[in-house]
């Protein structure tokens, strides 16, 4: 297993990056910047089927399965959610179904973004994680022998 | 930046420190900054008298009401029924029997839909609502229409947020059995001409329900002068506790309606062969009601009455004018709902910025606004937007808070651009 494929190591990297910020402004400007840099999803993929519904913002998520690994692409109509989505892709894209299914994603809490997972209906982040895990489960079941 | 020239002194601004001291939550900090609470149209904060009565009830006279023979039950019953009388006076109902307690506006509308609606709506009939309705005044009627094969008709809304009243004569007919409209839009703040709608609806024999959830907080309500058949609202937007709603209905209509929920309190006599029902208003109040919160609600009504509804209205109007002026100076900001008569509420969008992003960055500055579709998705579709930012002002809000909000908003826009 290479270093880059270890979810925990990437999470630790992100936590490290965020430890440099000492104000909420810096933190959010960084997330907003990540959102802006995330390549937009092609219009053809922004379909109802690919929508992960939050109450306010919409996230579109697609996944493809290649040689035992799942690759995610995503987009959102809201910039901060898009930045958070960008981090989730960095952590979870290119992993095996098992890695994705067992990921606890503690980094979201550690960088102070836990409120975005709160039980209000205000965003699609929680739904996005659930959807990524659904994909992992689905691909695992399609091809249970492939690691 | 301070815009003193736009700040009109009001009866409330002179006493604002004392008024704000009545609302303990206004002292708290959010994200280490003083709370600026501009989500009043969702729920208002509670004065200390309301909070203290809740405690006093549980500490001194908690008892189930109406049947207890002991002192505590008598005290609780008396206080509970005193709130009913206070509400009757507050909305100028003709009789206390016309005031039914529910869990909220939503339940009150569902009560009418499930009882009056099920009895009177037949196949091919029409229910008329408006394009600015809250989901609570859409979905219950959709359910009735589906069940009865009736049709839901919509009064359109114009670009400025006013209802297209000129469409009414073509929408109303003898097929129209019920008209259900809000007196003011929760998403836009626009005030609807309900007196005119009620009159025209009655001409074709329709019954009219007015959703007063927003309007009752700001406008003087006289249900007899309005001549509406039903009027519904919630306590919690009117500085009262959560979980209490009011259904006003004309007595003869309520008398004729079938019961809603079955259980205790709503019965006169029960045998396994037949149950006879209690009289109004208890006929519609099955089970133990929200006793403590109903009792405490009276103190909210007293609070706004003592402060003076005209004085509150004037203050809120000045806040609205001030905020509208400042927000209008922000480039690419567009206010939705631009009628001359509005509640103290501003709903807006900013080009190319998602309302949720603004809401998150405002929250980080201690500023609470509502973002999203405001449970009025059909209205958002009408304007081809997914949602708005809504800032709504209450009697305890100040010009200084609006300055904080506007500067916070400009900062959020800078961060997102």
Image (cartoon, rainbow, N blue to C red):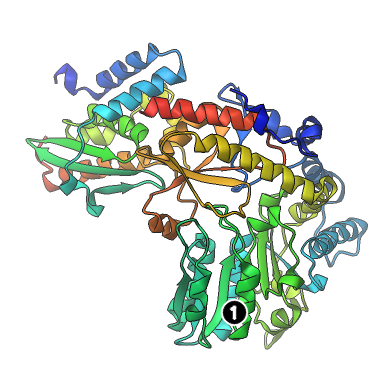
Whether residue B264 is visible, yes or no, is no
* Residue A102 picture location, percent across and down: 28, 33
Image quadrant in which you'd find residue B295: bottom right
Whether residue A63 is visible, yes or no, is yes
* Residue B69 picture location, percent across and down: 90, 64
Horizontal side of residue A13 vs B95, given as left or right: left
Identify the residue at the far front of this view.
B5
Q: Label 1 crowding class (10 Å Cα cut-off): few <14, some 14-19, many 20+?
A: many
Image quadrant in which you'd find residue B255: bottom right
Looking at this view, is A57 or B311 the one in front? B311
Q: Where B109 sits versus B353, above or below?
A: below
Task: Return the residue at label 1.
Answer: B201
The quadrant of the picture occupied by the C terminus of chain B is top left
* Residue A21 picture location, percent across and down: 40, 13
Looking at this view, is A115 or B29 the one in front? B29
Give the residue displayed 68% in from the left and 36% down from the top.
Answer: B397
Give the residue displayed 42% in from the left and 60% down from the top.
Answer: B378
Q: Where A14 sits versus B184, above or below?
A: above
Q: Secondary structure at mark 1?
A: helix
Identify the residue at the far right of this view.
B71
């Amino acid at each position: 297993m290479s270093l880059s494929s270890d979810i925990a190591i990437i999470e630790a990297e992100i936590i490290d990056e965020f430890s440099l910020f000492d104000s909420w402004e810096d933190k959010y400007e960084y997330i907003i910047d990540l959102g802006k840099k995330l390549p937009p999803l092609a219009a053809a993929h922004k379909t109802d089927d690919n929508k992960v519904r939050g109450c306010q913002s919409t996230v579109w998520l697609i996944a493809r399965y290649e040689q035992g690994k799942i690759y995610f692409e995503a987009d959102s109509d809201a910039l901060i959610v898009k930045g958070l989505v960008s981090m989730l892709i960095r952590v979870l894209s290119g992993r095996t179904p098992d890695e994705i299914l067992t990921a606890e994603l503690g980094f979201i809490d550690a960088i102070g973004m836990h409120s975005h997972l709160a039980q209000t209906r205000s965003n699609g982040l929680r739904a996005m994680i659930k959807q990524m895990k659904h994909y992992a489960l689905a691909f695992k079941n399609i091809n249970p022998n492939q690691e | 930046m301070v815009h003193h020239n736009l700040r009109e002194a009001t009866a409330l601004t002179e006493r604002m420190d004392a008024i704000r001291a009545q609302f303990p939550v206004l002292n708290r900090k959010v994200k280490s900054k003083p709370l600026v609470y501009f989500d009043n149209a969702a729920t208002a904060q509670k004065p200390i008298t309301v909070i203290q009565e809740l405690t006093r009830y549980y500490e001194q006279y908690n008892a189930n009401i109406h049947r207890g023979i002991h002192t505590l039950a008598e005290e609780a019953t008396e206080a509970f029924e005193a709130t009913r009388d206070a509400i009757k006076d507050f909305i100028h109902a003709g009789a206390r029997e016309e005031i039914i307690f529910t869990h909220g506006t939503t339940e009150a509308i569902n009560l009418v839909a499930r009882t009056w609606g099920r009895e009177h709506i037949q196949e091919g009939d029409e229910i008329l609502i408006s394009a600015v309705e809250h989901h609570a005044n859409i979905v219950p009627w959709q359910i009735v229409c589906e069940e009865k094969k009736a049709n839901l008709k919509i009064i359109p809304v114009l670009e400025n947020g006013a209802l297209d009243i000129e469409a009414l004569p073509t929408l109303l007919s003898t097929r129209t059995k019920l008209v259900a409209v809000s007196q003011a839009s929760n998403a836009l703040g626009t005030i609807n001409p309900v007196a005119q709608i009620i009159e025209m609806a009655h001409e074709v024999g329709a019954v009219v329900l007015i959703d007063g959830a927003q309007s009752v907080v700001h406008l003087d309500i006289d249900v007899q002068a309005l001549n509406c058949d039903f009027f519904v609202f919630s306590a919690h937007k009117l500085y009262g506790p959560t979980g209490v709603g009011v259904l006003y209905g004309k007595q003869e209509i309520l008398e004729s309606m079938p019961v809603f929920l079955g259980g205790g309190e709503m019965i006169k006599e029960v045998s396994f062969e037949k149950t006879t029902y209690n009289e109004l208003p208890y006929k519609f109040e099955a089970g133990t009601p929200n006793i403590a919160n109903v009792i405490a609600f009276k103190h909210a009504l007293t609070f706004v009455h003592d402060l003076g509804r005209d004085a509150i209205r004037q203050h809120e109007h000045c806040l609205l004018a001030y905020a509208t002026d400042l927000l209008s100076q922000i480039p690419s900001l567009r206010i939705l709902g631009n009628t001359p008569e509005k509640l103290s509420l501003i709903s807006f969008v900013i080009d190319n910025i998602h309302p949720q992003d603004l809401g998150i960055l405002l929250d980080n500055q201690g500023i609470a606004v509502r973002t999203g579709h405001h449970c009025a998705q059909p209205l958002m579709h009408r304007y081809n937007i997914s949602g708005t930012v809504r800032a709504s002002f209450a009697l305890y809000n100040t010009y200084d808070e609006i300055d904080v909000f506007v500067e916070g908003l400009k900062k959020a826009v800078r961060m997102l651009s």
